[in-house]
Image (tube, rainbow, N blue to C red):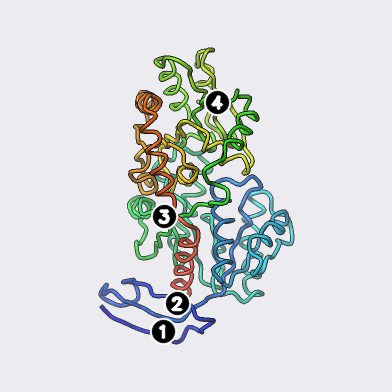
Amino acid sequence: MSICTDRRAPSYGNAYVPWFGPDLVPGGRTLLCVFHADPRVLIDATAVPADRGGVGRYVDALVAALDADGARISVVCQPRDAALYTRLAPHSRVVPAAETVATRTARLTWEQATLPRLARRLAVDVVHSPHYTSPLANPAASVVTLHDATFFTDAVLHSSVKARFFRTWTRVSLRRAELCVVPSQATADELVRVAGADRRTLHVVQHGVDTERFHPSAPEEVNAVREALGLAPHTPYVAFLGALEPRKNVPALIRGFAQACQQLSGERPALVLAGQPGWDSQVERALDAVPHHIRVIRAGYLPFEQLAGFLGGAVVVAYPSLGEGFGLPVLEAMACGACVLTTRRLSLPEVGGDAVAYCGVGAGDIAAALLDLLGDPARRAALATAAQRRAKEFSWAVSATGHREAYARAWVLHRRGN
């Protein structure tokens, strides 16, 4: 092992960041590089949609955690989000984009033409692009977050245009960025396997969970959600939270739930599908085939303040995904003390561990797992307790530390490359 101390990097404050990597010395020897580094970072939040999905929750929580940790960040965002980021990051600079970049084409044009000029004007050391794309003429070190590899492994689960677009940009980012942040080891492994990624340029940093929003709920919170959903008090329900897109495997969940209900004696639960509408045409067909005596509710997008009650009040939170880069909805349900049923695809076991129940992705597998859980209150309670305990291992503070290490490492790589 070689040891070096990089004193060429200016010292700002007292950040002392160790990192390991075989990429700076010939022959693949491992280098322990220790340096004083607190790079100035510009986070591009312009890709975050108004209705916060997983990527939006990632960016919002990361910005807040970095600010709380004393990182020197600036955030460029859509004008509508300026007040939000000012509140989330009171010690950081928030820069509204001069024009609204609402469409994908407009945002990409702005990213390539205007973001590099902004980076120069702010004199930042690192630009963090948190959603696949980044400026090609970046004057600073580039860090790009790649959330998953399903555009390569399961392209049929996405629209053809979307799959081609993100495959292209994933390859561009892997080739041009100093570092790519990925949220799980499974995602890193898949990018190496299917996209030819150099493992040395991948930095695994898991997400955290927002415990202010996702926590065990009080009975009145659950009752308020039941009332909003049109459910009578104490009516049991199985919950799903996520976009209705093919990767989430919602048609199989609907069919599996219907099969399970037909075998249940006594009160049958309802199935509540919450989340943004997607493009899975099979969802409507599966819903049309559900017998009339089985209740399935399409709740649509739920406001954040209802999510803890929705997840925590469910007898089971079912998330039979065909594959995730991380699985934030699973972690959020665990933090709410829910009994979670998911699959072993890709990163999900990294999140759930032994604290969730697992099933296959077919309707019959889902039905059998639901029957087991619905018929065993003691097991549901044990899993809920274990899930809440495991969720505490994932924090945005730890994630912020991992991102700061990525920024510092990318900065040194950029300086050495120049």
Disc 2 or disc 3, which is closer to the eye?
3
Task: Report helix, strand or loop for mark 1.
Answer: strand
Label pair 3/4, CB-CB below 8 angstroms: no
Determine whether, in the image, residue 213 is placed left or right of residue 103. left
Type of amino acid under label 3: Glu
Residue bearing mark 2: 412
Q: In front: 326, or 414?
A: 326
| Residue 417: image location, x then y, percent | 44, 77
Q: Looking at the image, is mark 2 or mark 3 earlier in the sequence? A: 3
| Residue 98: image location, x then y, percent | 74, 62
Q: Looking at the image, is mark 1 or mark 2 earlier in the sequence? A: 1
Q: Please determine whether, in this image, residue 32 is positioned above or below residue 199.
A: below
Disc 1 or disc 4, which is closer to the eye?
4
Residue bearing mark 4: 234
**Residue at the bottom extreme?**
7
Q: Any mark on residue 393, and which?
A: 3
Marks 1 and 4 sit apart, C-alpha to C-alpha, by: 62 Å
Determine whether, in the image, residue 349 is placed left or right of residue 267. left
Label pair 1/2, CB-CB below 8 angstroms: yes
- Please give the count of numbered marks on the rendered protein: 4
Marks 1 and 2 sit apart, C-alpha to C-alpha, by: 8 Å
Type of amino acid under label 4: His
> Badge 4: how crowded within 10 Å, few (<14), some, or many (20+)?
few
Determine whether, in the image, residue 51 is placed left or right of residue 285. right
